[in-house]
Every structure is written in C-alpha cells, then in structure tokens.
Image (cartoon, grey):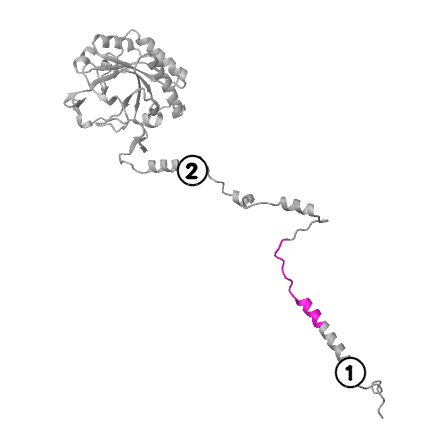
C-alpha cells in the first residue's frame, strides 16, 4: 500500500517556480564568491603617502621636503668631476712621459745625457731666445776654435784657471794666442759649506794683468740660501776691486760627481733664486754677470729663462754644441793644451768682445 507524501496534498505550478528561482540565486551567489576569491588585484602604480591624522598642512610640508634631483643621489659622486687644473696636469704628465720615452731628434727637442748614462729628450721652449750661430763658420786649428763672419774672425780664445793649474806662465799664454782668462776667485765647500779664496788667485790676477790679458773671474758656489750667495758675490767684489775686470763675473754652481753636494737638497726654483741673488749683487756693483753650466744644468737644474739680463757660459764638450738657446761663451773642451800651462786646461771661445764694451 503507498503512503501519502506531504507534497502530494499541495501539488500545483507556483511552488515549483519559487524553488527554481531560489536554486538559481544560490548558484549565482556561489559563483560570485568564487570569482571574487580568484580575481587578481589591480596594482596601484601611484605612490601612496600615508600621513597620520592627515591634514592639508602636513601633506604640503612632506612634499616640499622631498624635492630631490638626480644630482642628490650618491651614485653621481662616485666619479668626481676633474678640475681644469687636474686635466692640464694630467696632459702635461702624459706629454712628459711621451717626450722622455721616445726619441725626438726632430729639431724641436734637445737630448739630455745624465751622468749615469740615461737619456731624456726635452721639448725646446719656443719662447726663449735662441742662438743664431752658423757653425759652418767655425774653424779649429790645433784645438783652438775660431769663429768667422764674412771672412773676418769675430771670436776670442780663452782659458779658465784655478789652483789646479798651479804655476801658470801668462806671458806664454798671451804669445800662444790666448785673448782672455777666467780666473777662479774662490769656492764654497760642497760638504762643509766653508768659503775660501783660491790659493793662487791673487798671484794669477796680478800676472795676467801684467801680461796684458783680458780678465774675467768666476766663483764655485755651493750656496743654499740667498744670504750665502750674496756673501759669495761680496767676497768676489772685495778681491777684484784693485784690478780691471773687463770680462764677466761668472756664477758656477754644480753637482759633484760620485758624491753628494749641498745644492742637491734644493729644488730647481730654489737654485734659480739663489743664483739670481749672486748675479743681481754683481750687476748692481756695475760688473757683467754670467751664469755657467752644462746643458743638463741649464735645461733641467735651473730656470735659465729667468736670467735674460745675464750672459750664459755654456759648458759642452762637442765639435758643435747642441744647446739651442742664447749663450755668449762656450767651454768646448776640458782637454785643451796651450803653452804656459802644464797638463790639460779648459778652452773657451767667446762670441763677444767684452773688452770693447
């Protein structure tokens, strides 16, 4: 027998519609929840500034304090900008390295050969006065140099003398064609710094005067201050005042071979200043000042450009000197031989007749 269902008694069209609508609503709700859970959030590309108890005034202060530019970031300071001075210095160092490492026998450089045998090519200063000698007019007879112009001899032959030549026959020098002598007045010790008169000076200057030779003098300096240089210059003046000095008074500052000299402690500028003190003192006394040196000394060890008012006495043993700048006297050999002197002596040629000044 079949029992009666609760629905059987209320069966009809309207209840079935309500049930269908309810199921549909439920399904849609479930789908909505699922879609909401699986939906990817949209990323916000704008910065968010969080301000506690936000107000218009606080927001303005924060924005104003955060106005940084790219220049404020540390990465821009990792490579500091090079100054104009540093750039020039770097270029100068590069040029010097190139000059010293490569042969520059191109007429625009001069070669320096140091005592240890090393060599360096130095660029010729285009602003310094050059010598204009035409050495095709230079003639050597028995080791004695003569310089001609238009067929006329316009040079003068000389020797430089100190105690190392000991007793000199100045009359014999004169008869052998020597025109002038450069006599050493004295020297300063290259270690002790003590100053002294050359032991042969007074005898030499007296005999040279009697022989009718033109006379110039020089001092071997190891001064390391301007006061010491002036002391040396004054010693020279005190010892020549009784004699006629027609040729220059020369300043001879040098390094010492195989030993350390006082002047090695000085910089190039300091040596220049010291030399200027001596030469200015001589010039102020009314004599002709002269700076002595070899090519290395005149190019590298002292700033010869500062001595335009002084004559230059070049020491360069060569058939033809390579020193490009102005000079008035040239010591061309230390192995000269002349009558009146036993052994070797320095021979010099002067391109200026100082006795006619």
Look at the picture and state if 105 lies above or below 42: above
Instruction: State which region is magenta.
Output: 30-47
Q: Position of residue 29 (x, y in %)?
A: 73, 72
Examine the structure image and report whether residue 31 is included in the region drawn in magenta. Answer: yes
Between disc 1 and disc 2, whose residue precedes?
A: 1
Name the residue nearer the viewer: 355 or 185: 355
| Residue 95 visible in the shown view | yes
Q: Secondary structure at mark 2?
A: helix
Name the residue nearer the viewer: 262 or 79: 79
**Residue marked by disc 1:** 16
| Residue 222 visible in the shown view | no
Q: Position of residue 100 (x, y in %)?
A: 34, 35
Using residue 303 as the reference point, say whether residue 211 is left or right of it: left
Using residue 3 as the reference point, say whether residue 51 is left or right of it: left
Examine the structure image and report whether residue 97 is included in the region drawn in magenta. Answer: no
Q: Residues within 10 Å of mark 2 (few under 14, many from 20)?
A: few
Quadrant (top left/top right/bottom left/bottom right) for the N terminus? bottom right
Q: Which mark is residue 227?
A: none
Quadrant (top left/top right/bottom left/bottom right) for the C terminus? top left
**Residue marked by disc 2:** 87
Give the residue furthest to the front: 56
How far apart in space, not on screen, are marks 1 and 2 (Cα)?
Answer: 96 Å
């Amino acid at each position: 027998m079949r029992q009666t269902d609760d629905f059987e008694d209320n069966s009809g069209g309207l209840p079935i519609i309500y049930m269908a609508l309810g199921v549909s609503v439920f399904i849609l709700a479930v789908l909505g929840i699922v879609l909401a859970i699986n939906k990817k959030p949209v990323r916000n590309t704008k910065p968010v500034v969080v301000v506690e108890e936000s107000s218009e005034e606080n927001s303005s202060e924060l924005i104003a304090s955060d106005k940084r530019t790219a220049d404020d970031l540390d990465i821009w300071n990792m490579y500091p900008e090079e100054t104009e001075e540093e750039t020039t210095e770097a270029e100068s160092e590069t040029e010097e390295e190139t000059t010293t490492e490569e042969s520059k026998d191109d007429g625009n450089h001069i070669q320096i050969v140091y005592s240890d045998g090393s060599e360096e090519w130095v660029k010729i200063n285009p602003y310094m006065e050059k010598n204009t000698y035409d050495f095709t007019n230079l003639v050597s007879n028995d080791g004695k140099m003569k310089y001609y112009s238009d067929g006329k001899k316009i040079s003068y032959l000389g020797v430089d003398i100190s105690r190392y030549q000991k007793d000199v026959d100045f009359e014999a020098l004169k008869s052998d064609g020597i025109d002038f002598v450069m006599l050493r007045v004295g020297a300063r010790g290259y270690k002790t710094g003590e100053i002294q008169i050359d032991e042969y000076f007074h005898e030499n200057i007296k005999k040279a005067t009697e022989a009718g030779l033109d006379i110039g003098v020089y001092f071997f300096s190891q001064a390391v201050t301007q006061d010491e240089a002036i002391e040396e210059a004054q010693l020279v003046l005190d010892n020549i005042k009784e004699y006629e000095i027609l040729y220059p008074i020369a300043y001879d500052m040098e390094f010492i071979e195989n030993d350390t000299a006082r002047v090695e402690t000085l910089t190039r500028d300091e040596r220049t200043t010291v030399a200027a003190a001596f030469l200015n003192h001589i010039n102020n006394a009314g004599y002709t000042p002269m700076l002595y040196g070899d090519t290395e000394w005149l190019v590298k060890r002292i700033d010869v450009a500062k001595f335009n008012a002084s004559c230059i006495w070049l020491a360069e043993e060569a058939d033809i000197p390579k020193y490009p700048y102005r000079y008035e006297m040239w010591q061309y050999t230390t192995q000269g031989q002349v009558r009146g002197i036993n052994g070797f002596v320095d021979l010099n040629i002067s391109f200026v007749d100082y006795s006619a000044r």
